[in-house]
Amino acid sequence: MHLQGIIDKILTKLASWKGAMLSIMGRVQLVPLVIQGMMVYCFQIYKCPTALLNSLDKNIKNFIWSSYHSQRKLAIVPWDMVCSLWRNGGLNIKSLKSINKSSILKLA
């Protein structure tokens, strides 16, 4: 797959960050700035498969809640609430599916 190189880079970034040394808000700030920024670059050209986006979303959720992308932890809040806006009580993290969809619609 042509996106596998980017996915591998994202997973190595998640693994290299010392998540245990960061607060949950530090991890929340890293995700949109770095990870979603890398994905927006590819979304300008490609429509990613849904299974790939679900897998990346799962790794991002694991990183935010447990500080390791491969270790699962029971989430305190539903992911839909986390993805909502600040003024609605969320953390303003956008779903990768919605970012991909909006980028592809921009091309149309």
Image (cartoon, rainbow, N blue to C red):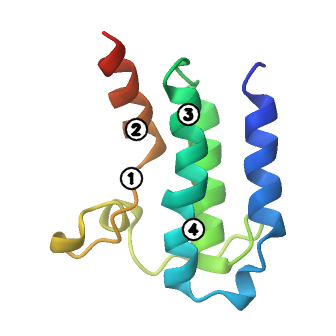
Q: Position of residue 55 (x, y in %)?
A: 65, 44
Between the C-alphas of marks 3 and 4, the distance is 16 Å
Quadrant that contains the N terminus: top right
- Secondary structure beneath label 1: loop
Residue at 58 percent of width and 24 percent of height: 49
Q: Is residue 90 left or right of residue 46?
A: left
Q: Earlier in the sequence, mark 1 or mark 4?
A: 4
Q: Disc 2 marks which amino acid?
A: Ile
Which numbered marker is on residue 30? 4
In the image, which is nearer the foreground, mark 1 or mark 3? 3
Mark 3 and mark 2 lie on one chain; the one further toward the N terminus is 3
Q: Amino acid at mark 1?
A: Lys
In primary-sequence order, the first of circles 1 and 2 is: 1
Asked whether the residues under the numbered discs 1 and 2 touch, taking CB atoms below 8 Å apart as contact, a structural biologist would say yes
Q: Quadrant of residue 105?
A: top left
Instruction: Kindly indicate the quadrant of the structure image that contains residue 60.
Output: bottom right
- Horizontal and vertical percent position of residue 37: 54, 47
What is the quadrant of the C terminus in the image?
Answer: top left
Q: Is residue 61 depicted above or below 35 in this figure?
A: below
Dot placed on the residue nearer the N-terminal end, 4 or 2: 4
Q: How many marks?
A: 4
- The residue beneath circle 3 is 41
The reply, left or right, for residue 28 in relation to residue 49 is left
Residue 62 sits in quarter: bottom right
Residue that extends furthest to the left in the rendered view of this protein: 87
Q: Secondary structure at mark 2?
A: helix
For label 2, the residue is: 99
- Residue 16 in picture, x, y percent from top left: 83, 67
Disc number placed over residue 94 in the picture, else none: 1
Residue at horizontal 39 percent and vertical 76 percent from the top: 77
Marks 1 and 2, how far apart at CA: 7 Å
